[in-house]
C-alpha cells in the first residue's frame, strides 16, 4: 500500500467518521474513550471554530459511550472540568452550549 505512505497520520484518516471505533466501543469502551479524549484534546488545542465543532462531535460520542456504560456521573464531572480548563476559549464555550 505504497500510496498510503504519503498520507499524514491524523485522526481523520485513521478512522474517518469513527466508523470502526463506534463498532468496537461496545467491546472495548475504555480503550475507545481514551482515544476519543485524545482526539478531542488535539482538536480543541488547534483552535478555530471548525476544530471546536469536531471536538464537540467527539464529545457527543464520548457522552454516548459513557452513558451506555453507567458512567454518567463521570461524564458530568469530566465535562465540568473541561469547561473550567478552557473557559477562556469563547468559541469553544459557544460550541459546548448544547452539550450536557
Image (cartoon, rainbow, N blue to C red):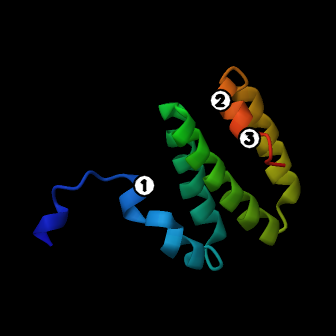
User: Is label 2 in a helix, a strand or a loop?
Assistant: helix
Q: Name the image quarter holding residue 5.
A: bottom left
Name the mark on residue 55. Answer: none
Instruction: Estimate the spatial distance between the alpha carbons at disc 2 and disc 1, rounded to whole Å.
Output: 22 Å
Q: How far from the left and from the top, in percent, is residue 44?
A: 56, 36
Query: Do the residues bearing badges 2 and 1 touch, measured as CB atoms within 8 Å?
Result: no
Which mark is in front, 2 or 1? 2
Task: Say whether disc 3 or disc 2 marks the residue closer to the N-terminus.
Answer: 2
Q: Name the image quarter holding residue 92.
A: top right
- Against 31, is 27 above or below? below
Q: Mark 2 sits on what residue?
A: 91
Residue 4 appears left or right of 50: left
Q: How far from the left and from the top, in percent, is residue 96?
A: 74, 40
- Crowding at mark 2 (Cα within 10 Å: few <14, some 14-19, many 20+): some
**Nearer-the-camera pick, 46 or 49:** 49
Which mark is in front, 3 or 1? 3
User: Is label 1 in a helix, a strand or a loop?
Assistant: helix
The quarter of the rendered structure image containing the N terminus is bottom left
- Crowding at mark 3 (Cα within 10 Å: few <14, some 14-19, many 20+): some
Task: Say whether disc 3 or disc 1 marks the residue closer to the N-terminus.
Answer: 1
Q: Name the image quarter holding residue 23.
A: bottom right
Residue 69 in sight in this render: no
Q: How far from the left and from the top, in percent, is residue 98?
A: 80, 46
Q: How far from the left and from the top, in percent, is residue 21?
A: 53, 71
Q: Mark 3 sits on what residue?
A: 96
- Against 47, is 37 above or below? below
Residue 37 appears left or right of 12: right
Q: Mark 1 sits on what residue?
A: 11
Amino acid at each position: 500500500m505504497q500510496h498510503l505512505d504519503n498520507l499524514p497520520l491524523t485522526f481523520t484518516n485513521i478512522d474517518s467518521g469513527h466508523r470502526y471505533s463506534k463498532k468496537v466501543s461496545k467491546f472495548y469502551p475504555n480503550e475507545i474513550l481514551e482515544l476519543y479524549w485524545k482526539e478531542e484534546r488535539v482538536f480543541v488545542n488547534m483552535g478555530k471554530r471548525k476544530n471546536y465543532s469536531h471536538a464537540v462531535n467527539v464529545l457527543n460520542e464520548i457522552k454516548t459511550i459513557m452513558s451506555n456504560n453507567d458512567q454518567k456521573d463521570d461524564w458530568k464531572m469530566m465535562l465540568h472540568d473541561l469547561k473550567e480548563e478552557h473557559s477562556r476559549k469563547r468559541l469553544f464555550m459557544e460550541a459546548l452550549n448544547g452539550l450536557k
